[in-house]
Image: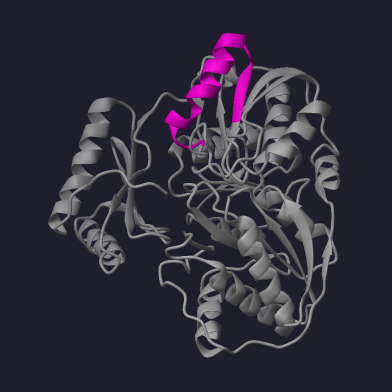
Amino acid sequence: MTHRFDPTSLREYDIRGIVGKTLGPADAYAIGRGFATHVRRAGGTRVAVGWDGRVSSESLRDELVRGLTGSGVDVVRTGLGPTPMLYFAEATLEVDGGIQITGSHNPADYNGFKMVLQHKPFFADQIQSIGRMAAEGEWEEGAGTVTDADVEDLYVDRLLQDFAGPAFRIGWDNGNGAGGRILEKLVKRLPGEHLVLYAEIDGRFPNHHPDPTEEKNLADLKALVAEKGLDFGIAFDGDADRIGAIDGRGRVVWGDQILSILAEPVLEEVPGGTIIADVKASQALFDRIAELGGTPCMWKTGHSLIKVKMAETDSPLAGEMSGHIFFKHRWYGFDDALYSAVRLIEAIGRLGGSLTALKDRMPVLVNTPEMRFQVDESRKFKVVEEVLDRLEAAGAKVNRTDGARVDTPDGWWLLRASNTQDVLVARAEAKDQAGLDRLLAQIDEQLALSGLERGEQVAH
């Protein structure tokens, strides 16, 4: 038996697609066969499987499990829950890998698969190899077993194991995502007063899109914090591996700003530690890490790439603008928004008790959101290379870590190709609006020289 995937579904960091169009049960079966073959060839025998609350997740789960067992791997089903709970199960149960079925922060008709093999991210060529194995039917054969493990309470216990934060009045927005049951259990055990929006897990996302990095999705949380006079608010994406936050005045605390708050207590305990952030993060973050005596490291965007870099540099903490926060300090090194929320409560308590005051003290910079616009797949990386060549020929100050990040007297701008979509990503940050306008003009000039213009905003 052989199988061919839709070429758009095998991404850099995961497998993802529109159910019924580019992803379906036959794909799930082939993923199970291929992943189990990797596990067997690495000397493993057991895999944990979790899933989110999307309408399609259970049917994909059943076929994934059939594929895993058909290649001789035993499956431990860890239940409906957030992606970090599956990562926790993979880190703590006697298993050799894990797969979470989740569409993450994508619209309701999407779904996908995030994978871990022997405590390391499974990505890039490993994902492409799933496609090659399927095309050739090159799978191990066997007959695995299926058991269930209830890890919810173990996970909540571990989230709170060494918590030492004060009592706050906090608003939470689960966005009907897969973290709902865990969040309800968690807040019952946290000190203070906690008001939770949309805890019910509903894969249709009837209230708003589950992506806290887009400010419009935080409107209900802002209203709750304002109406009840709460200290601050915390929001999660659809599978609770990305965190968003607002202060008591309803201002968004962006991913790099959350990381700058979390870094301070970590660096008190790990002096000189390497704190990693992706190329989209503010220069203010890298400056702050250095000011605190840490070693700032600017790295490529992508949760798998960040995890590999953390292991390489022995980093205690890392993060992305997209709200993925990774703790190795007192944790396992994976991105977990629920755990990051617990640590954020602790950090705010330790740094004076007011997220609003912490936000007030941050440098006032003018920046764009992440601008994402469509470009032909065959051109996206070439355009970035063309821009880099022109800039370097002109003597510009350019960082090539992940695309082109250009420093100018006004601030900086970034142009990079998405690893997962036919999209170019741009961002700019300056000290004032006039400077930002000049940076945007530079981006537009470079795009025009490559025959492009910034088009309409594309979703993640």
| Left or right of residue 158: residue 102 | left
Residue 228 at x, y percent in the picture: 62, 10
**Magenta-colored segment: predominant secondary structure:** helix
Residue at (66% x, 51% y) in the render = 83
On screen, residue 355 above or below 203: above
Q: Residue 97, located in which quarter of the rendered image? A: bottom right
Give the x, y percent position of residue 337.
Answer: 65, 41
Quadrant in the picture for residue 377: bottom left
The segment highlighted magenta reads: 212-234
- Residue 411 is left or right of residue 288, and the answer is left
Residue at 78% from the left image edge and 26% from the top image edge = 165
* Left/right of residue 76 with respect to residue 267 in the rendered view: right
Viewer-proximal residue among 157 and 320: 157
Q: 97 or 391, which is in the foreground?
A: 97
Query: Residue 397: x, y in percent?
Result: 31, 51
Q: Against 214, is 396 above or below? A: below
Q: Is residue 268 visible?
A: no
Q: Is residue 219 magenta?
A: yes
Between 415 and 455, the one lying in front of the other is 455
Determine whether, in the image, residue 55 is placed left or right of residue 455: right
Find residue 244 and report its horizontal and vertical position in percent.
55, 34
Residue at (47% x, 34% y) in the render: 284
- 400 relative to 288, above or below: below
Q: Quadrant of residue 47?
A: bottom right
